[in-house]
Every structure is written in structure tokens, then in C-alpha cells.
Amino acid sequence: MSSEVSRTIAAPADQVWDVLADGWTYAAWLVGASHIRAVDAEWPAPGAKIHHSVGSWPLVLQDDTKVLSCEPGKLLELEARIYPAGAAHVRFQLTSLGPARTEVRMTEELTRGPAQHLPKLVQKLLLTPRNKESLARLASYVEGRVRTGRQSTP
């Protein structure tokens, strides 16, 4: 049983994809990512990584997230590692709902480490609220860029 959430974002799919394809933005919208230390130049090509920190100072863990597959503008599949909890398979699927709306579906399943042994219902209860908040933050981030006409990140 995985956690699956979706949200409609008031922006074209290419503008939503621009944010997903920019690894430097993840700390701005992904719940849990507190700091991006580095992003491989090939991101979001398969095998490329975001090197991130998770948590609040002074309890910060450093790990990485690797691209498993990528269909530009449509799909991004990741393996998110968070030592010592394990790893999760995360999937972002974009569906255009017209010229100015995109549905983003986020699916996450714990795949390695001690956390995967939690009962599936408990995993879902832990992941779903976090992922809903992540998509809410992603929507605010993307929609703010659309309103201001800003296409690049700092």
C-alpha cells in the first residue's frame, strides 16, 4: 500500500515540470528537505542525484535522492534515501488539464530500511499528510512564479 495524493495546479504542465526539473527548488516545497547541498548537472536524467539535508538543525541528516526514470513534462520517478530510515520510491505524474491547469499525482512507497516494516496502513497515515502538504507547497511555488512571470530560480 502506497500513499497517493493529487492536486490541481493553476499553471501549464511545462511550468510545473520546470520546477520538478530544477533540483535546487526542492527545499522550497518538499516537506522534509531542509537544505539542498548539491544537484548533479544531469538532473533530472536517470542516475542523477540531489544531495540534500533532512531535518532541523542541529538534528540534520545528509543523504541523496536519485532519478530512476524521467519523461520530461510527464513523469519523474525517484529513489529518496533518508538514513537510517531507509528509502522510498517517489513518483510524480503530470497530466495537463488544459492550457493553464495541471494535475500532479504523487505516489510514495517505502522500499528499504526499517521504516518499510511498519504496517502499510501506518506508512500511509504518515506519508499522506506530508505529501499533501508538499503538493500544496509545490502549487504555491509554481503559481507564484506564474503570477510574477518569474521563470528562473535564484
Image: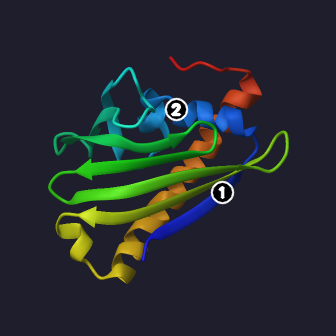
Q: Is residue 88 left or right of residue 143?
A: left
The answer to which image quadrant residue 110 occupies is bottom left
Question: Would residue 85 be found to the left or right of residue 99 on screen?
Answer: left
Q: Which residue is more in the foreground, 127 or 46? A: 46
- Which three-letter amino acid code belongs to the residue tagged 2? Ala
Q: Residue furthest right?
A: 99
Residue labelled with disc 2: 21
Q: Position of residue 23 (x, y in %)?
A: 44, 31
Q: Residues within 10 Å of mark 2 (few under 14, many from 20)?
A: some
Helix, strand or loop under label 1: strand
On the image, the x and y values in percent for residue 79 come to 34, 50
Task: Say above or below: 49 vs 109.
Answer: above
Q: Viewed as shown, does residue 21 lie left or right of 150?
A: left
Give the Cα separation between the discs numbered 1 and 2.
Answer: 18 Å
- Amino acid, disc 1: Arg
Question: Which residue does the image show at 69% across and 33% down from the upper left?
Answer: 14
Q: Nearer the viewer, residue 129 or 64?
A: 64
Q: Position of residue 140 (x, y in %)?
A: 63, 42
**Left or right: 144 in relation to 124:** right
Percent position of residue 147, x then y:
76, 29
Q: Nearer the viewer, mark 1 or mark 2?
A: 2
The residue pinned by badge 1 equals 7
Pointer 1 or 2: first along the chain: 1
Residue at x 75%, y 39% (from the top left corner): 11
The residue shown at (35%, 32%) is: 48
- Tell me the quarter of the image containing the N terminus: bottom left
Q: Which image quarter: residue 88? A: bottom left
Q: Name the foreground residue: 152 vs 140.
A: 152
Helix, strand or loop for disc 2: loop
